[in-house]
Amino acid sequence: MLNVLIFTHVVLASTHAGTASTVGQCDISQLALDEHWLFPSSSQTMSLLQTQPVKTVPLLQTQSVKTQPLLQMQAVKAKRVEVGRNEAEHSIDSLAGFGAIGWFVAAVLACWATAPSMKTAGAKATYEELWPYARHTGFFACFIAQASWLYYFFLANKAADPHFGTYFWPISPDLPTLVAMDICAELVRRMVTYNAKYVIFCICFGMSKEDYVFAKGARSEWTESDVAHFSEKYGAHNIKVMDAINRRLGHVIVNVWRIVLLGFLARSISGRLQLLIVSAVISTSWRFLLEHSKSNVASFMFAGARISDGRFGRFNQVIVSFFSSAGKILAILIFLRSSSPLCDTETEMGSLIGLALVPLLWGDTFGELVGSFWGRLQFPVLGLGQGAKHKTVEGTVAVWMSSTIGLLVKIAIRPLPPSLAHWMPLHLAAIVAFAATAGEALAPCGTDNYSVVVSSAIALAVMRRC
């Protein structure tokens, strides 16, 4: 500041004296002798410093007066746009919600209509006559129920996020790699379960090779007497245990792989969603096409079909395949819907989907094993195209306990994401496990792979906002 003052006074002094027109021609030594020039009074300094602000204040005030109406207009316009967007989101959510609820009610009624018909098969119709009716009703309930909820959350997310469509198109760069790894893992799982089925049925429980070949074949011509044959020859309890071990082995393998694939290997939300869509189309299509086939390829692919399901053994796996993929897709859409500016769902998605799959992996597994081995207290549940079934209280308790322990282990291995870090691990595990247990206990047979994942995802989404 002192240098600026010296420079200014040099210019003024040289001009006033008339001895020079530039600073270089001024006698600096003479000016330096004047202490008033070198050290001007405070009043002079203040007057010099205040000259420019006094001149610029009216200009700034004038500009602010001119721009104030423009800023007010822009604020009003932005507010109107925000209000319109909120109204649009509310309208879309309401429309989608009513549509989803209506379709879901229709699906539940279809499931409800199937079970009583199967219960009264001897009084109203034969097993063969109910077979096409039950399959058509099951397919209707399956696809309508899933389409309704996927439709609702798709529209809800699209209204909240203008860029939501980019999760589905263009194709994610890592999609080919993910699909190739998933196909290889699926073939490995089929090989393991196909060979393990022979070990469990023939070596461990002494099933004859003729019965084993018949059990792994096509089911479209089975009758109630075929199921009764196995139950009488090997014992109903042993058949139930064989089915549970064989089915849960493949269940554990595929869901461990899904947690690794979706939680760690897939790096983007678009990659996960597109992979699940491709997987749902491929797995459901080949199961649907091979359901009635008597080839070895069909026996290889349907190695997890239960004997106790009778004619509906392969049909059950067709339904389970679609429900399982749809549940994972819907879980991701639920997590996206629960996003907020304070939580980064893109980076948290791997951890969230892993938490939602843990109850499916351990809860569903131990629930069926405990219920099959030691279950005594039974309660009825609806059947989706395969007749009414029973679940056990012991199995339901095992679902909650194993889900809680599994979640605690998962949290110990990979800490909770920031949006859930304010929850104590034990509280979070117990709540999510309870939601998964309720979904498993209330779900119609063949749909628990869907209900467990969706119930867990809803609980986690609510806890992110609490």
Image (cartoon, rainbow, N blue to C red):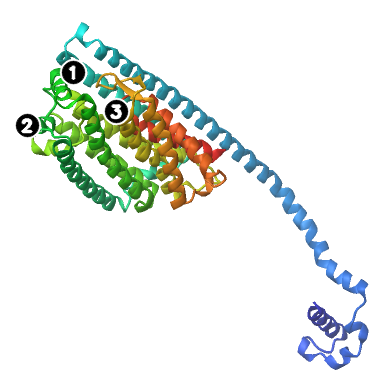
Q: Position of residue 198 (x, y in %)?
A: 14, 39
Amino acid type indicated by mark 3? Gly
Q: Which residue is mark 2?
A: 210
Mark pair 2, 1: CA separation: 25 Å
Q: Secondary structure at mark 2?
A: helix
Please identify the residue farthest to the left as the structure is shown: 210
Q: Position of residue 119 (x, y in %)?
A: 26, 13
Horizontal side, residue 463 vs residue 403: left or right: right
**Residue situated in front as seen by the camera: 386 or 102:** 386
Name the residue at 39% across, 24% down: 442
Q: Earlier in the sequence, mark 2 or mark 1?
A: 1
From what the image shows, is residue 270 above or below residue 290?
below
From what the image shows, is residue 62 above or below residue 212?
below
Q: Earlier in the sequence, mark 2 or mark 3?
A: 2
Amino acid type indicated by mark 2? Glu
Name the residue at 89% across, 83% down: 37
Q: Position of residue 278 (x, y in %)?
A: 27, 42
From what the image shows, is residue 211 above or below residue 73?
above
Q: Secondary structure at mark 3?
A: loop
Q: Earlier in the sequence, mark 1 or mark 3?
A: 1
Horizontal side, residue 76 vs residue 147: left or right: right
Q: Which residue is mark 1?
A: 131
Amino acid type indicated by mark 1? Trp
Mark pair 2, 3: CA separation: 28 Å
Q: Which residue is mark 3?
A: 446
Asked if the residue under mark 3 is in contact with the one under mark 2, i.e. CB atoms within 8 Å, the reply is no
Mark pair 1, 3: CA separation: 16 Å
Q: Nearer the viewer, mark 2 or mark 1?
A: 2
Image quadrant in which you'd find residue 435: top left
> Label 1: how many residues lie within 10 Å, few (<14), some (14-19) or many (20+)?
some
